[in-house]
């Protein structure tokens, strides 16, 4: 999928004045955010389990090569096939070649964020294969031709009315009103797809290295349908989704689900160990696991950003984020919204065009507090801000202008000596005073005009603290 | 953790299941209800079939498919439902024709399971912490049986209840080490549900809209 990260400011500004979207975003807060807090409070040893979850992920990411090999070996032992895709083109090619060689006509998709990175629906379409999203939220945004608004609730921005129109268009005009009826209408449409599909593409919530299993978590049951009905099952995973042991799953599922929706557990957790057993009643005869890199190696190689690979995609950081809750999911311009998106999107798709994303944060730390594996998101957002200005190893990824760099060089020159600082402060006061109104600077001259384009700047005090201090000291001395 | 440690741990889990069977069944009943199961306490095995028949009567269930879990035979569910006017059939692969039996079977089974009013299963385990039914699909235990029909009725016996997810994964790891893992496992905790339209929770989007858990023993 082509990133639209350059559009951040435009989409964010539009969202902030859209009352309907603001109401939907408030719902995210009231539902998921409060749900997570209640679930955490009701869970024994919650903090301990977060620590444990973090330790599991950290260990795995630090030995990722080993665990991915182990995973691949064990999947193959069960009769599954494994494909390592360096980028989305390689992943798409593998899936399409497989579908074409098996004469697949219809594919059902269970939610997969990696397949959004791949733009897989589009590629299926180009190859004349029908591809139907089966998570209701994903189905809605597929019908609308949009991207997910939220990791857990992709269509949370759509009103009942809009959903009604989209489903009616698919049902030959029959329009439903209530959420219950709309859901049943979608059920009927998707049942048809489940029954005729030859192949499914699912995501992966966790992959277990020692057993060669993948784990899918859904409330709707589409993950189960996708792993029961069609004859071919393809699971796509980002290469960071692996955990070492079956016994890590208790903790990981607990912190994932409780952080995502506030439930104790989702309706369905499905563990797949390869294709069906020969004597089974149903289930796919073929199982393929596509492990996608698509820039993740770059994150792995960067000690400052590696931590982003600990993410288990629960969405808690965006529910907690005061910026996400105003600018909404589409502002982030790619697959992953919210604070984690503000880190992985620029890191995976290019910092230069995504330079606004690391700034889409107040650095308040609510995301870090909410993260089930305690990822230090503010630290990485700051790191990326540093890279945006001048710290990125690749100079073409830096976004600061020549003028900006000159200004900061001058700033550093001025700030690093007492005499120069005092002189500069006096000069600033003298220059800014005539431009101010009532002690506030409403507009400033270039190259610093950006600072006052959306907020007022207070005029420096007419007397510096040091000057005032000195004056009072001498006054006192005089009194004595 | 070494292989011996895991086998020891698994042994301990089994003793806990037996020793705390009463408490665990109580805890399961509580958490299953929170998860969205309609919980029925049958008391003894003799009552289970009557409870199931009542569920079918109230929900208007005319056709049901069941798994081959031995607990269902133990409680004689077939005769009870049958005399209540329910067409109940066992979902187990019947054909053994040469060549393409898998494909034939898939078509037959799929039509049956997508048109039944209810699926009835036992449970391989249940989990008290989360109100979860655990199923390992295998011969006689279809993946779709507990998913495709609009209602699922599960019969859970005292003594099969695990305290939490952690104990389940100890047993799963034990199976893995013994080379006896099933091809898949489903944890079922309530009905199929979605909140994707304006956050309104609606059940029955892909799977059952109503799920019943009958506890006994």
Image: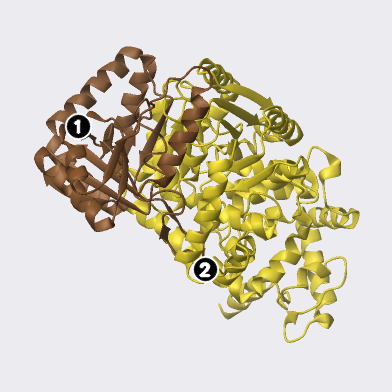
Tell me the residue at 77%/52% (across/down). A416
Q: Nearer the viewer, mark 2 or mark 1?
A: 1
Q: Is residue A36 left or right of residue B68?
A: right
Tell me the residue at 49%/60% (across/down). A183
Marks 2/1: CA–CA distance: 51 Å
Q: Is residue A291 left or right of residue B40?
A: right
Q: Chain of mark 2?
A: A
Chain A appears in which tint?
A: yellow
> Which numbered marker is on residue A26?
2
Mark 2 on the same chain as mark 1: no
Instruction: Identify which residue, B85 or B147, lies in the foreground.
Output: B85
Q: Residue B59: where, in percent of width, then height?
A: 28, 56
Tell me the residue at 57%/41% (across/down). A196
**In the rendered image, what is the letter of the chain coloured brown?**
B
As helix, strand or loop, the secondary structure at mark 2 comes to helix
User: Against B215, is B167 above or below?
Assistant: above
Residue bearing mark 1 = B73
């Amino acid at each position: 999928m082509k990133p639209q990260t350059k559009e951040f400011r435009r989409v964010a500004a539009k969202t902030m004045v859209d009352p309907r979207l603001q109401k939907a975003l408030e719902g995210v807060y009231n539902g998921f955010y409060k749900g997570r807090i209640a679930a955490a409070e009701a869970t024994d040893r919650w903090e301990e389990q977060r620590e444990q979850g973090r330790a599991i992920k950290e260990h795995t990411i630090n030995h990722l090569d080993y665990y991915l090999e182990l995973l691949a070996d064990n999947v193959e032992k069960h009769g599954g096939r494994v494909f390592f895709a360096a980028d989305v083109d390689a992943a798409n090619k593998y899936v399409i070649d497989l579908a074409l060689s098996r004469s697949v006509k219809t594919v059902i998709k269970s939610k997969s964020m990696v397949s959004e990175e791949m733009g897989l629906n589009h590629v299926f379409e180009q190859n004349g294969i029908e591809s139907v999203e089966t998570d209701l939220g994903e189905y809605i945004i597929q019908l609308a031709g949009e991207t997910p608004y939220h990791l857990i609730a992709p269509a949370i921005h759509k009103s009942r009315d809009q959903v009604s129109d989209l489903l009616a268009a698919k049902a030959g005009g029959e329009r439903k009103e209530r959420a219950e009826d709309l859901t049943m209408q979608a059920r009927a449409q998707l049942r048809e797809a489940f029954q005729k599909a030859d192949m499914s593409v699912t995501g992966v919530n966790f992959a277990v290295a020692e057993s060669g299993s993948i784990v899918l978590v859904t409330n709707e049951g589409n993950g189960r349908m996708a792993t029961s009905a069609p004859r071919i099952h393809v699971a796509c995973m980002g290469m960071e989704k692996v955990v070492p042991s079956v016994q890590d799953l208790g903790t990981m599922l607990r912190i994932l689900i409780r952080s995502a929706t506030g439930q104790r557990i989702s309706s369905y957790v499905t563990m797949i160990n390869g294709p069906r057993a020969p004597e089974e009643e149903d289930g796919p005869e073929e199982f393929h696991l596509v492990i996608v890199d698509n820039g993740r190696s770059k994150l792995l190689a960067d000690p400052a950003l590696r931590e982003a690979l600990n993410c288990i995609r629960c969405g808690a950081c965006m529910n907690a984020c005061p910026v996400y809750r105003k600018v909404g999911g589409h502002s982030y311009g790619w697959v992953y919204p919210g604070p984690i998106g503000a880190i992985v999107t620029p890191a995976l798709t290019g910092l230069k065009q995504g330079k606004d994303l690391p700034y889409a944060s107040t650095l308040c730390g609510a995301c870090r507090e909410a993260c089930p594996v305690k990822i230090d998101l503010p630290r990485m957002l700051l790191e990326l801000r540093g890279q945006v200005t001048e710290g990125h190893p690749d100079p073409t990824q830096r976004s600061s202008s020549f003028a900006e760099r000159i200004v900061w060089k001058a700033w550093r020159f001025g700030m690093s000596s007492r005499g120069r600082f005092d002189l500069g402060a006096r000069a600033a006061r003298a220059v800014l005073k005539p431009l101010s109104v009532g002690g506030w600077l409403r507009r400033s001259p270039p190259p610093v005009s950006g600072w006052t384009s959306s907020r007022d700047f207070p005029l420096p005090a007419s007397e510096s603290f040091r000057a005032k201090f000195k004056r009072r000291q001498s006054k006192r001395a005089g009194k004595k | 953790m070494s292989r011996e440690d895991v086998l020891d741990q698994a042994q301990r889990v089994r003793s806990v299941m037996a020793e705390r069977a009463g408490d665990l069944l109580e805890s399961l009943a509580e958490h299953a209800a929170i998860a969205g199961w309609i919980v029925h306490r049958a008391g003894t095995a003799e009552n289970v079939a009557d409870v199931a028949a009542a569920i079918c009567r109230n929900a208007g269930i005319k056709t049901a498919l069941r798994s081959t879990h031995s607990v269902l035979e133990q409680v004689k569910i077939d005769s009870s439902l049958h005399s209540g006017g329910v067409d109940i059939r066992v979902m187990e692969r019947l054909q053994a024709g040469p060549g393409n039996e898998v494909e034939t079977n898939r078509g037959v089974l799929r039509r049956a399971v997508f048109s039944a009013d209810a699926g009835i299963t036992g449970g391989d385990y249940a989990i008290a912490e989360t109100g979860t039914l655990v199923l390992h699909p295998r011969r006689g235990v279809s993946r779709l049986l507990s998913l495709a029909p609009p209602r699922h009725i599960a019969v859970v016996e005292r003594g099969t209840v695990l305290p939490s997810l952690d104990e389940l994964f100890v047993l799963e790891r034990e199976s893995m080490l013994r080379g006896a893992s099933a091809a898949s496992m489903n944890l079922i905790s309530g009905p199929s549900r979605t909140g994707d339209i304006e956050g309104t929770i609606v059940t029955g989007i892909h799977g059952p809209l109503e799920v019943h858990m009958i506890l006994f023993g």
